[in-house]
Amino acid sequence: MDRSAGLTAIGAYAPARVVTNDDLAEILDTNDEWIRTRTGIRRRHLAADDEFASHMAFAAVEDLVRRYGDAAIRDVDLVIVATNTPDALFPATASLVQDRFGLRAGAFDLLAACPGWVYALSVAQAYVESGQATKVLAVGSDALSKVLDWTDRRTAVLFGDGAGAAVVEAVPAPYGLKGTVLGSDGAGGGLLHVGETAPSLPTGEAMSGKLEMNGREVYKFAVRVMNDTTLQALAKAGLEPADVDLFVPHQANQRIIDAGRERLGLPPEKVVSVVDEYGNASTASIPMALVDALDAGRIADGDRLLLVSFGGGLSWATTVLTWGPMRPALAGARGAA
Ligand code: UT7
């Protein structure tokens, strides 16, 4: 493949409404100590009642444009929105984004649970590398708070809402995405799901319409993904764990993040963790973590980032991203690297 595809602009959005563990303890039989020690989560940002995945997607793209200017999204010819909570079954949330920004582009949503945004990057990569598209806007936006069972302390405390957006286009070697590993184990579909009906799930699986999860089993699966697919993706990219400058895992639980870091033998300063602030924001989790790291000056041009995500399906996605070259940040904007 002579062309490489990489990220040249990025933005993110977290809703204004902040809900602390103590706030949750007022409506659920839980407490700050349990949530912090079991998950590392202190707060989460939740969408307003009238705020949906499309609104957060718009806000993430607006943030990207604020950082890098209109030129960053000009001539985008494909919009992908990874979401598990689209405003409607259709139109696709991606079509709403296409219209909002006046893009002459194809548009579709991608549903792959929490790893959806990393899946979207792999699709964008394939389109750009094959020449089928020149500039892809890859968005992850989720309002899982709308599908949580707010009476279930086992799940309600874990998730938050948010969005992230990136432009994927051709970049010169050695920049760009490499070593991508996608996987699925549909036999585990009953362990984490949202829906009213699912004839395909094992009989007896009662569906409430709200998110339901077998936390312990998903935990074990997540640690397996951290252990195996990170090494697979690195090997595919011809790299060793020591070559990783920054590890950016899905932000579900600090204990899962720590397990992945230890397996790779990386020091804590090479890991991005924002789970304390945002909880698990599903498809938005990794782009929000990237923007946080960028704003903190933790990502430099040419850095090798290892992204890994896992979730319902069961599904997972891992990739190695050599950062840059980013479009020049606008004067006064955050995000120059
Ligand atoms: O995007 C992918 C998504 N999901 C994940 O990655 C989640 C993976 N799973 C996990 O992160 C963990 O399994 C949890 C954080 C969900 C749970 O942690 P755990 O250490 O596996 O706890 P547990 O499920 O074994 O529950 C331990 C106890 C139980 O009480 P008993 O049965 O021992 O008396 C629970 O009822 O903690 C209780 N518990 C709570 N207590 C206070 C469960 N949730 C809560 C809560 N507050 N919010």
Image (spheres, grey):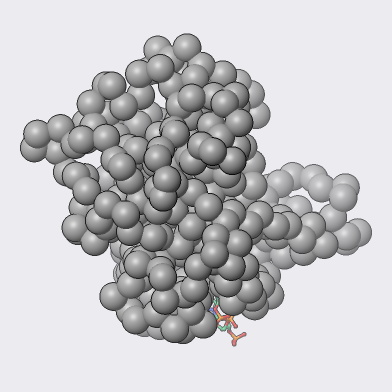
Q: Position of residue 53 (x, y in %)?
A: 47, 36
The residue lying toward the viewer, choosing from 144 and 210, is 144
The residue lying toward the viewer, choosing from 184 and 39, is 184
Vertical relation: 93 (above or below) 121: above
Q: How many marks do you count on the picture?
A: 0
Q: Quadrant of ligand 1?
A: bottom right
Q: Residue at x 33, y 59 (%)?
A: 303
Residue found at the far front of this picture: 2
Q: Position of residue 49 (x, y in %)?
A: 41, 38
Vertical relation: 272 (above or below) 266: above
Vertical relation: 152 (above or below) 162: below
Q: Residue at x 54, y 64 (%)?
A: 238
Image quarter where the N terminus lies is top right
Can the viewer see residue 148 in this picture? no
Say whether residue 253 is left or right of residue 26. Answer: right
Residue 80, image quadrant: top right
Residue found at the far right of this picture: 203
Q: Residue at x 91, y 59 (%)?
A: 203
Say whether residue 221 is left or right of residue 253. Answer: right
Q: Position of residue 18 (x, y in %)?
A: 29, 54
Q: Residue at x 42, y 45 (%)?
A: 173
Can the viewer see residue 272 in this picture? yes
Q: Position of residue 312 (x, y in %)?
A: 66, 57
Residue 171, image quadrant: top left
The residue lying toward the viewer, choosing from 80 and 91, is 80
